[in-house]
Image: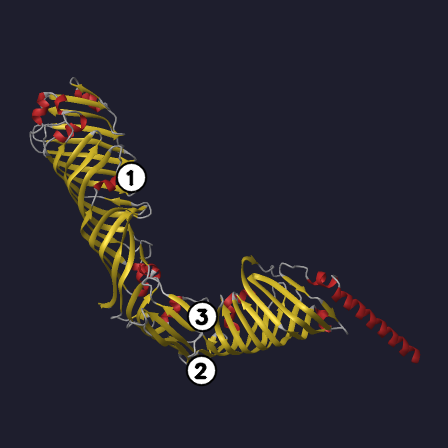
Amino acid sequence: MRSAIRRLVKTGLIVAVAYLVAGNVFLNTPLGPWAINRKPERFELAWSHGVTWWPGFVALWNVQARGHVRHVVWNASASRAEGRIAMLPLFSRELRLDGIDVAEVRVGVDRSDEEMLPPAARPGGWTLHFARIGTTTFRHARIVGVEVDANGSATFGFIKQLRGGPMEVLPSQVSLRDVEVRAGGDALLHHGTLDGDVAIVRHLREQAPGLAKLGLTDAHLKIDGEVPGLAVDLASASQWDTALVADANGGRLEADLSLARGTLGSGGRLELRVPLRATRNGAQLDEQAVVQATVGDSGVHLDVHLPPPPGDEGSLRASLDLAGSTIDLPLDAKAVLARTSGTLDIDWRFGSLEWLGPLLVKAPWLALEGAGRIDAALKVEAGRLAPGSRVEIPEVSIAATVAGHRFTGKARATGRLDAAGSGERAQVALAVARFDVAAADAPTVLLMRGNGLDIDLEASGQLLDFRETATTRIRFANAEVPDLKAINAWLPGEALAITGGQARLDADLALAADGRISRGHVGVHAQRASARLGALRLAGDFDLDGRIGGTDLAARHFDLDQTTLKLRNVRIIDEGRTAGEQWWANVTLEKGRIEAKRPFKIDADADIEMQNVGLLLALFTRHRDYPRWVLKLVDAGTMRATGRMAMDAGVLVFDRVEARNDRFAMQARMRLAHSQAKGSLLLNWGVLGLGLEVDKDRHEFHVLRAREWFDAQPALIGR
């Protein structure tokens, strides 16, 4: 018996010595890190030295750990870590650590642009069961740029089956004192305390990805601490300078909140008081901004008070109730809004109002730019604004891009929600006292300026759904076009160009919710304008009454049906072309379409009424080149004509032009390009007929078989 005992003791000692040697060699040579860090891109553990005295016990010094899960990169360090591994569960593929104690803990969590996807789920994964990881010397945490220093204790436990198995966070606690929080060099919390606990029920990753885990979480958080004051310099009219500063009055953050499987617990509260020190032109304000939230049986109540800046009467007050206290994920702003009721009063200057534009229009044609003051009184009932709610912006810079033109100016904006029959009608009006207009692709070149631009937006329903259904009306009158030559960028300059003159312009346009011009009217009134048409130089007055509809916003196409152009006092100033006559003509586009690019592309059918045919004759050649009997017919009475016109890329084409009065008929086609004309003309008076062929500077008359010659000429515009 004694020999058996001696052999057993000897064997035990040999095994113990072997374990001590093997275990400590494993911990203090590259063998240990090599065995553990098989996938260092996902997880890596390092230490300076370690020791194990008996199976299951491990102590490590200067421990460093890091990992990468999806977009989250984390790291942790401790001066010492000591743990106990349960040996028997290893035989059932479970790594169980009943307790790990760590000292001088520091952790960091950041976001990475590189996503590390988890491996595909498959059976047979080991189970990690860390019943308790605890420290009484928590020191520091860095969470996405926010630095936290503290002294205290924390315990954390979890169970995770590898290869896509379930995960559970065991009841865990944290208790910290002397909490200091910083971000970007600014202190956010002083002398704070934080106590909390959390647990997450066992679940698979696909059952609750990301923040959806809140629906499986039980937690309690209690925090108390000093917050800095906010110093604001209001000297700048467009931008306020702000800085976080220490404040003797002592701002404070207090919170006591609980969460039970995604629902906030009744009795929870949060209160934030921030001292404000604002200065403007020597005047100073010492006040507090206050945010208070309380959780009741029926939901959450929120009170917000922001005092006015010095020298102002503005303020921000909100008293809102959120029905229910369940946190539904993913968060949907509209769903949260539908549960909200209360009042919101704002009279405040914002450093930027650019965020308002997307709330007003669905297509990005309207922008509110720069700083501005908002004066609003809103009443919300179950997420809907109640009639009588109003918003006013006394002055804001706007930029509106319509049909390739950019309107800019300072606007006064007002918004209202009123009852309309059985529903509501939301209206937003922008009144611009003075405005400038330039091409959207050449914003520094002034095309037009004017006084009194009205942009009125209206929708049936809610201001908060405004952008989805809002229609717009844009109006102005008597705007000045100081130099008509500015529109040459849109004209085929080789064939048609403005050489001088001024004009006045009126417009009344209706836009659909997508920014498309559904209908509209543009009026241009010019006096003493001059132009070059091919080789001709013209002068006179004109009135354009443009009727716009059928817009294709993406292609920038507009229908011009029933658009009219009235020419008055038109004369040709080229010597030898005429004898100083003046003409009038009225043109109506029965079917017309324009593509708003530079230059314009136009295709139209036209009806024309003109004083006589003299102006058309002058387009082909000098009057003195025609036979006398033709010139006698020039003033033979008012002519009526039809024809087609096309304009594109430096070329102007007239085709199928047919004109007649009681005694005289004419047909014509012409192509103007590079200041050169090419075309054919047929004149008929009773049995007399005359054809004229023009090719640049050459012209040739056809007397015999003039009709057959003209009919043989090719059309210039296809059907």
The residue tagged with tag 2: helix, strand or loop?
loop
| Left or right of residue 121, residue 18 in this image | right
Q: Dot 1 lies on which element?
A: loop
Q: What residue is disc 1 on?
A: 599
Q: Are marks 3 and 1 in contact (CB under 8 Å)?
A: no
Asked which quadrant contains residue 701, the reply is top left
Q: Is residue 656 visible?
A: yes
Task: Indicate whether 678 appears above or below 410.
Answer: above
Is 572 on the left or on the right of 371, as rendered?
Answer: left
Return the residue at label 3. 328
Provide the residue designation for mark 2. 267
| Three-letter amino acid code of the residue under disc 1 | Pro
195 vs 674, left or right, is right
| Furthest-bottom residue in this view | 267
Give the alpha-carbon distance from disc 3 to disc 2, as whole Å. 20 Å
x, y (%) of residue 69? 58, 62
Decide if residue 124 is in sight here. Answer: no
Structural crowding at the residue carrying mark 2, measured as other residues with C-alpha within 10 Å and reported as few (<14), some (14–19) or many (≥20): few
